[in-house]
Image (cartoon, coloured by chain):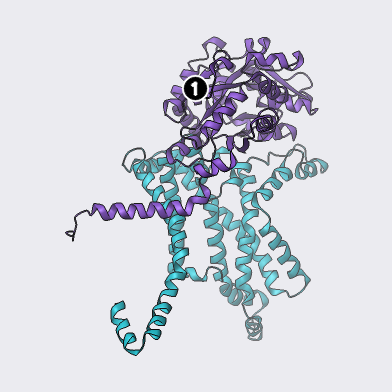
Amino acid sequence: MARDLSAPAVRQGTARGRRSHRSRAIPWLLIAPPTLVLILLFVAPIGYVLLLSVADPRPSLAHYQRIFAVPLYARVMVNTFLTSLVVTGLCLVLGYPIAYVMARRNNWMSTLLLTVVAMSFWTGFVARTYAWLVILGSNGPVVAAYQALGLGRAPTLLFTTFSSTLGMTHILLPYMILALFGVMKKIDPEHLKAAASLGARPRAAFREVFLPLSLPGVVNGSLLVFVTCLGFFVTPVLLGTPRDMMISQLINQQIEELLAWGFASAVAMVLLATTALVLAVYNRFAGLDRLWG
Amino acid sequence: MTQPGRIDRGRRAFLKNAVVTAGAAAMAPLVITDRTIAQTRTIYVNTWGGSWTAAEEAAFFRPFTEQTGIRVRTVAPVSYAKLKAQVQSGNYEWDITAITQAELLRADREGLVEPVDWSIVKKDKLFPDAVYANGLAYCAMGTNLVYRKDRFPLGGPRTWAHFWDVQKFPGNRAMQNHAVRTLQFALVADDVPPDKVFPLDVDRAFRKLNQIKPHIKVWWTHGNQSQQLLRDGEVDTMVMWNARASELQRQGLPVELVWHGATITRSMWCIARGAPHRKLAWEFLQFAVQPKPQADFSNRLHYGPANPEAFKHISSEVARQLPTYAENAKVAIQPDTVWVADHTARIQEVFAQWLAT
């Protein structure tokens, strides 16, 4: 192919032929380093994990069978999925009104909210997790407030399903708000005025016009939160109970404590496949290129 | 030309080499090579972090660097899994680690441990029983029942049976996420005589553990975490390493530790097989098991020195708090190293499943 194309170039003069060669090569040269990095640091290691999952200690699919056959491991899978759903739902319920105010108001309030959300977004999640250890701890403000109000002995808050769900929701909330905000900000306020001029009350205008237009943000935010939550590790470890084990905790336990790399690799592949499946469904209906607005 | 379908070995080998070379070139800055060793003379030690590493810095690392010019870098936390990963992959993050005697036996059987280099380690400079399964004896560690005196004004739990008795000794509890020790404490709580605890009756231990499980607020994994729980008042009585509890006492916390039914495990230094700085590492270990550094470590962090000569440099007040002190060792239980090494893998798996259900 290259020979065919260069033939006329040679006839017309070598200088131009060289240039067309070069312009053809440049995109490949630009793409080569990132491709190489992706293959070396991403594709190759995942391929190795896949290999381990079917070949360590001996070639078989037993690890995959075990994930679904042992009740505990199947429960970890289901628990991870349900926890991610609950956290996504909570983020949506809490995040939608905040994003709405941020997008619809053009005053100090929206600036303040955006600043708070962005600061929260940029604060390390380990620090935010530790903050909950203090807030919900036996000597923390929640227990103190409980006793000050004379409500008696406070219920156990820390190291429960409640505290780990709360921590994960808190950490992922900024993702949801920013995804919603990006879409809501682009909704033309004139649409709502038009609805009002046609006799729609504010509630109807919101339901019939704003809400459907904001749905892409709902889908984007939910996807981001759900997929991130599937692989959560530190927060459930520090705030939760061993009973609410998530997939990544199971992987860590199998590698660190039991040295069961083959099984851990199989669990990791299931997590990867689940994530890919969720993304594929999203891509089918919405298009991955629209994820960040 | 090769026929279609026939394996072209030459080309395959070339491709394989090309990939390996490209990979090595890309990873070069991350991998320790012979050249970097010659330039820096640094060893990497796997350690627990927190007060453990601080005591090691003062007792072993700084004096060793002053004496030899060899620098010591630390990597935390201690990980048996990483020992295996390093030896299998040939990528070394550290040279030396300190694990329990049973773990060492297991690692040595799996070929993960560098054989003792007798050209560097001098037998006449070692104490009796210093070498075991290609490791050098480091210290004796107690894992004890610990409680806060201010939370138990009428007297705290003095035995594992008391710890299990949530009616008479109400309060928040924590245990270590460690299979063998936890089963051992359960059997003592179930009135198994100390000399009959090993071999562990696993079923009986789990039956006893089921009683206490709902009352355990946290299963801790790191020493710092265990101290945090007691310091913050999150927990009133718990399983804790003796030196970590002694440290809290020195900081003024009203903490009591119980030696009755405690377990004493031996910590051992070893070198990952094929580690790049193994020669320097043996030099370091030879230094680290000498009486003076051993005593310096025990004076700072109250684990018992493995070298009996170290007691010359330890005050009787400190010696009384160590697991090696006769009164303490007499009432504590020393695990059966060989039995633990044989059964750990299986017990850990059952324990991990039990914990998550």
Query: In the picture shown, does residue A29 fall above or below B208?
Result: below
**Spot occupied by residue A61 in the image (x, y as percentages of width and height):** 33, 43
Q: Which secondary structure, mark 1?
A: loop
Q: Amino acid at mark 1?
A: Trp
Chain A representation colour = cyan
Q: Chain of mark 1?
A: B
Report the label total: 1
Residue B59 to residue B122: above or below: below
x then y, percent, for residue A73 = 45, 41
Q: Which residue is mark 1?
A: B118
Q: Which residue corresponds to the image point at 35% horizontal and 52% vertical from the top-left? A: B17
The chain coloured purple is B
Left or right, B152 with reference to A66: right
For residue B207, say whether it is visible: no
Residue drawn where x is 42% and y is 45% of the image: A265
Residue farthest to the bottom? Answer: A12
Image spot of residue A237 (x, y percent): 59, 42
| Relative side of A81 to B2, left or right | right
Mark 1: give few (<14), some (14-19) or many (20+) Cα within 10 Å.
Answer: few
Q: State left or right for residue B192 relative to residue B325.
A: left
Extreme left residue here?
B3
The answer to whether residue B315 is above or below residue A236 is: above
The x, y position of residue A51, in whole percent, is 36, 47
- Viewer-closest of B259 and A75: B259
The residue depicted at 59 percent of the width and 45 percent of the height is: A236
- Identify the image quadrant of the N terminus of chain B: bottom left
Residue A118 in view of the camera:
yes
- The residue nearer to you, when weighing A111 against B203, is A111
